[in-house]
Amino acid sequence: MRRFGLFFLALLALQPADAAETRLPPREGEAQAQLVIESTTDFVIFEPVLLAFQQRHPDLAIIYRELTTNELAAHVTAACEEERFVADVVISSSIDQQLKLVNDGCGLPLGAQAHAGLPDWARWREELVGLTFEPAVTVFNRAYFSRRPPPRSRFELIDLLRESQDFVGRIGTYDIESSGVGYLFAFQDALQASTWGRLVESLGRNRARLFCCTAEILNRVADGRLLIGYNVLGSYAFEHAAHDPRLGIVLPSDYTLVMARAAFVARAARQPALAEAFITFMLSPEGREILSTDMALLSPVDGAERLEALAEDGTADPQTLRPIAMTPALLVGLDGAKREIFLEQWRAALPASPR
Amino acid sequence: MSTLAPETARGQSIAYRLGVAMVLILVMVVLASIVAATRFGQTASDETFDRLLRGAALQIAERISVNDGRVVVDLPVSAFELLSLARSDRVFYRIIGPDGQTMTGYEDLPLPRSNAGADAIYDARYKNTGIRAVKLTRLLAERSMSGQVIIVVAQTTRERAALAGSIATNAVLIIAAAGVLLLFLALLVLRVALKPLARVERAILAREANDLSPIDVPAPQEVAVLVAAINRFMGRLENRIEAMQNFVADAAHQIRTPITALRAQAQLALEEKDPERLERLHRRLYARSVGLGRLADQLLSRALIAHRADTALRERIDLRRVALEAERETRAVSDQAINVDLPDEEVWVEGDAVSLREAVKNLLNNAVRHGAAPVRVQVERREHHAAIMVCDRGSGIPEALAARIGERFTSDGISPDSAGLGLSIVASVAAMHGARLVHRKDAEGFAIGLEIPMIRS
């Protein structure tokens, strides 16, 4: 039962009937073309950049379909095998699943200018490109940490969890069985450092609470139901913290994982040229500006510098940033057998606990 | 069109021919090197990337274990990081358990042909693209489990082809650069090597028109042969010109004296009234003009001989015929009887019939004029030689003249009547035939003639 891909097949039943679909009519007149984007990102987050792209192509209609990472992967895998059209552009924060899709030949090569400024880690072949620059951060409740410093690194976090009983049931992180991003960060953590084992143990001892989604963690940390959120997507955290002073953010100083939402143009795309133009636009100075200012998504092209401006003084050290490279090594985390082994270790330390 | 080819071929310079030959050879060498470089690039690239594949498969094999009677595959990330060294190649893998079922990975990844053995490395096609795959078999021998696990790791071939291409391209660039450099150097060497020719050419062009002295230019062996040939030719030319000048000077000298005498006597005859003395003057005039005629004849004969010595073809001739013709032509200008004494068989010698006839005619003329009748021409066969002799009953040539036979004939005042001029012609003919001018004097009289090497038939 540990076959590779079976995991997706099980989810295939979940046809995105419940997928949120947003239609952007052309700005002027009749639609000359229609660009279909399937994504795991909330529409509101990409809305500014979609509208800006439409300004350049006023006669373009956009259909933006929102799915969970696993739904998206299953959906696109099935379509790819049947060589059926589902979307022109596929964007997901689950970059391992995206990489597997491209590895299986579901992507189209892009022109050189589509990925011109990208660093090597943020692209694979000429097909998969990173669009954002999102660190995995630790969030904390400012009220609780008003009298003591928040944990700056994983070592400090482990020590804090060991010393204090305050955190029992009040530390949260992703449920890596249901959150693609959570699994990705956890798997990379396990590869990066020896702290992982101790950290998982500490989380288990403090009966850490597991969540599917970033917003749930952020809201709970802000209102004090949780004191610390570990490995939270920085883009959402910065966005939330921008208008919620109760939330504090730390970029772990031992190392900070950075993830780039990965996009590719589907092989069966109906508008490959427009799809490529959209990706090129996202990475252009104008697109980067929108991603970095309207949202805290940043861009792989210049994300490291912009992150320094966003983070609290001195906490963002470019030396500690560890971008998750888009290489076939990501396939290992997706391997059915490997995933089973990894989850077994996780479950052993963190038995599912009531929320 | 076909006639053009040899002409242009003759006109091509040595530098051009050598240059074309060198370019052709270099082009062939470069082409062969390119083929070799391409193969080498392919092999080198295959070896490199096959090592990656094998290394990854080995790392995976190491992480296969048996746990609670179950085969567990714990894929190592390092194996995939190894494969990721081929930056843009897609990676496929498949692990088949002891029951023959795919445990994890791509279920439809092709296996090698069944006879490929436990471990194999092979090319295949998967997901519409060419792949290179390695198959590794791990034998399990645990208490609870025995059997084999098959590990297949495959990669697309893009980086492999790119590396092969870049190795080959680099090699080809180097080879091509070396080729161009070699060509350049070769042409340079060619120029240097052919420089002596240009030097000889300049030396010849720089000469005065009448300078026929040997060319003295330092030249390598090959060119020295050419220079020597030119020098020999110029030497011959110089000899000819000198002979010609000598002849003109001699002839002028020879003819001027008798003509002056002739004119003086003709003038005397015009003023002479006494019929008896006039009669005597007439006779003398006649004798003088006959002598002058013979002198002119001999001068021309000598010029003819000198010319034929250089140009006439040597042919097989019967000496008896020479004797007969000489006798007949001599008899035409003189009424004296000449005996002919010939052997019965042909007497073959190699030479120029005209020159030999002139020589014998001169000898006969001398005998008729200076010797005593009867005059006889005879052909003799000797051991290795044939001889053609002219005999008479006279006392022969004076000792002083005999010693100087063959010298330039005008070195003293030999009169047109003397035998000297004729003998010098005979001596020239002898020299040109490798013959000897022989003479003997005995009780029978005087005999003179040529001893010529005979051809045995």
Image: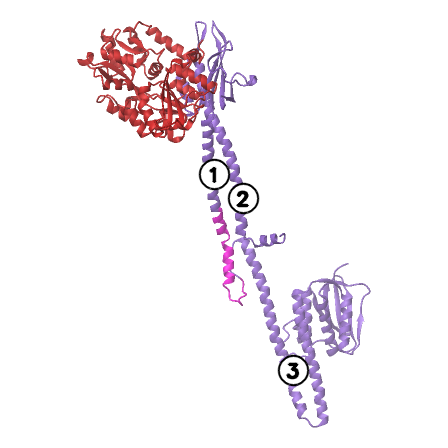
Extreme residue in the front direction? A29
**Horizontal relation, residue A349 to residue B439: left or right:** left
- Find residue B24 and name its label: 2
Q: Which is the main secondary structure of the residues drawn in magenta?
A: helix
Q: Estimate the spatial distance between the alpha carbons at disc 3 and disc 2, rounded to whole Å.
A: 75 Å
- Of callouts 2 and 1, the N-terminal one: 2
From the top left corner, tell me how far across and down residue B288 is, in percent.
69, 83
- In front: B191, or B110? B110
Q: In which quarter of the image is the C terminus of chain B?
A: bottom right
The hue of chain A in the figure is red
Q: Nearer the viewer, mark 3 or mark 2?
A: 2
Chain displayed in purple: B
Q: Is B263 or B338 nearer to us in this picture?
A: B263
- Residue A354 picture quarter: top left
The reply to whether dot 3 and dot 1 touch (C-beta < 8 Å) is: no
* Residue hosting label 3: B258
Q: Mark 1 points at which residue?
A: B175
Q: Which residue is drawn at 54% across and 46% down?
A: B21
Instruction: Give me the chain letter of mark 3.
Output: B
> Please, which residue is most extreme toward the right here?
B344
Magenta stretch encompasses residue B195:
yes
Q: Does the magenta stretch include residue B203?
A: yes
10 Å crowding of disc 1: few (<14), some (14-19), many (20+): some
Amino acid carrying label 1: it is: Ile
Q: In this view, does A141 lie above or below B23?
A: above
Where residue A167 appears, as percent x and y from the top left, is 24, 8
In the figure, B78 relative to B304: above or below? above
SS at circle 2: helix
Q: Which residue occupies 64% across, 87% down?
A: B264
Q: Which mark is residue B220?
A: none
Whether labels 3 and 1 share one chain: yes
